[in-house]
Amino acid sequence: MPSLIVAASVVLAVALIETDSAGGDRWLAKWPRLFGAGPEGAHQLLSTLAGSMMTVMGITFSMRTARAAGGRCANKCSGLPSWPIAPSTPRMIARESRSG
């Protein structure tokens, strides 16, 4: 099955390249707002997408790191909502039941 997907992708790529070369600038004249951005517009679009992805990744990483480092005290001290913690070992369960 994967080899069929690869073969279909190669055929589709060749067909689309041939269609693009045969059409020339006809697409630009028909839809200038969609295809008329040029290399600078493509660069700005990709820069915006990459920046957004890095922002989401940074926020996710910092929330995960703060949660892992802070434990339950970080939530009580900072006023954040208390998220459930799943203990990973029986010793942690025993420690929490003795301290709690």
Image: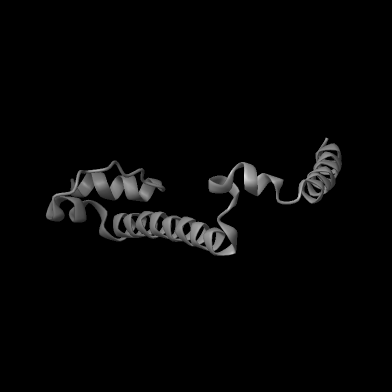
Residue 88 horizontal/vertical position (percent): 41, 47
The residue sitting at 26% across, 47% down in the picture is 96
Foreground pick, 85 / 67: 67
Instruction: Identify the residue at the far top of this view.
Output: 1
Q: Quadrant of the C terminus?
A: top left
Foreground pick, 51 / 89: 51
Number of disc labels: 0
Residue 49 horizontal/vertical position (percent): 48, 55
Question: Based on the displayed image, in which of its 4 quarters is residue 5 positioned?
Answer: top right
The residue sitting at 82% across, 47% down in the picture is 22
- Report whether 76 appears left or right of 90: left
Q: Quadrant of the N terminus?
A: top right
Residue 74 horizontal/vertical position (percent): 20, 56
Instruction: Identify the residue at the far front of this view.
Output: 29
- Report whether 3 appears left or right of 35: right
Render colour scheme: one colour
The residue sitting at 30% across, 61% down in the picture is 69
The residue sitting at 28% across, 50% down in the picture is 95
Residue 66 horizontal/vertical position (percent): 29, 59
- Report whether 43 appears left or right of 13: left
